[in-house]
Amino acid sequence: MKELVVAASVFTASHMVGAVRPLRAAIVARIGERAYLALYSLVSLVLLGWFVLA
């Protein structure tokens, strides 16, 4: 049960990072829009998988 709570928290936190516009803009400026979207998608899929398996 503890792992489920941690997985859900990390998954939620990762989505909150994308919602903070200045932080997202800084990341996009550094690595580019396509790279950001690819990285964000990959991280989201991995975390979703962890959340489901927990």
Image: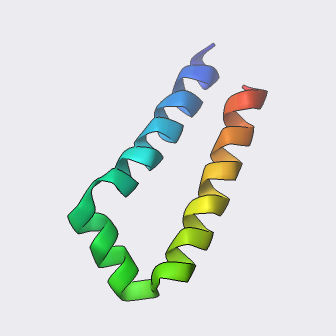
Where's residue 30, x and y in %?
37, 86
Which residue is located at x 46 percent, y 48 percent?
14
Which residue is located at x 58 percent, y 18 percent?
2
Of 45 and 33, nearer the camera is 33
Which residue is located at x 33 percent, y 52 percent?
19
19 displayed left or right of 8: left
Above or below residue 22? Residue 46 is above
Q: Report the quarter where the N terminus lies.
A: top right
How many marks do you count on the picture? Answer: 0
Above or below residue 17? Residue 49 is above
Q: Report the quarter where the C terminus lies.
A: top right
Which residue is located at x 67 percent, y 32 percent?
51
Question: Residue furthest toward the right?
Answer: 53
Where's residue 34, x and y in %?
55, 81
12 displayed left or right of 8: left
Of 18 and 1, nearer the camera is 18
What's the colour scheme?
Answer: rainbow
10 displayed left or right of 26: right
Of 35 and 47, nearer the camera is 35
54 displayed left or right of 47: right
Question: Residue furthest toward the top?
Answer: 1
Task: Choose top left, top right, bottom left or bottom right for residue 29.
Answer: bottom left
Question: Residue furthest toward the left?
Answer: 22
Above or below residue 26? Residue 47 is above
Above or below residue 24? Residue 26 is below
Task: Choose top left, top right, bottom left or bottom right for residue 43.
Answer: bottom right
Where's residue 7, x and y in %?
58, 32
